Image (tube, rainbow, N blue to C red):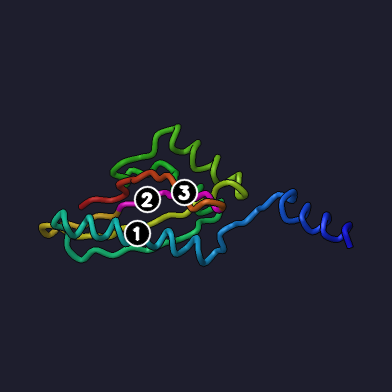
Amino acid sequence: MRLYLILALCLGFCAPVYAQLSSNEQLNLVEDIAKNDRREMWRGGFEEVSSQVERPTKNEIDEAIKLSPMDAEPLATDEIAAIYSCYNAPARCVVYTIYLYSEMYGGSGTSRRWVFLDPATGAYESILQSVYEE
């Protein structure tokens, strides 16, 4: 009986805990970030504000970071490195993108927020990129 008690205590206190947020919990956190971005855009006078959240694949990331003459604000080298660094370490970091669409004074624009989410804690860092302005 004592052996079982010691084993149970050891498993409870000695075993490492690798609690990860579920995919739905991660998505909810990123949706909250998108919601805050939309709110700030509305407060800034933008109209017809909407957003779309994605968890990009490697090919989608490759396509998104290609330098395009349509990009209003290309990514810097260190920002591109941060995206790939996060993508290549899925146990510590998950890449999400938030596309933000808006209109203002008859013009329109699209921004992309790269979110680097820690799946264990929910902490995140992000890069905001202006993709298209008209």
Q: Quadrant of residue 36?
A: bottom left
Mark 2 and 1 residues: CB-CB less than 8 Å, in contact? yes
Residue 80 % position (x, y): 46, 38
Mark 2 lies on residue: 113
Task: Using a 10 Å C-alpha cutoff, classify the residue at mark 1 as few (fewer than 14 neighbours), some (14 to 19) or many (20 or more).
Answer: many
Residue 35 % position (x, y): 32, 62
Q: Which residues are magenta?
A: 111-119
**In this orientation, which residue lies closer to the viewer: 121 or 132?**
121
Mark 3 lies on residue: 123
Tell me which label, 1 or 3, sits earlier in the chain: 1
As helix, strand or loop, the secondary structure at mark 3 comes to loop
Left or right of 48 in this view: 126: right
* Amino acid beneath label 3: Ala
Q: CA distance from mark 2 to mark 3?
A: 15 Å
**In this orientation, which residue lies closer to the viewer: 70 or 88?**
88
Task: Using a 10 Å C-alpha cutoff, classify the residue at mark 3 as few (fewer than 14 neighbours), some (14 to 19) or many (20 or more).
Answer: few
Dominant SS of magenta comes to strand
Tell me which label, 2 or 3, sits earlier in the chain: 2
Residue 9 % position (x, y): 77, 55
Mark 1 lies on residue: 34
Q: CA distance from mark 1 to mark 3?
A: 15 Å
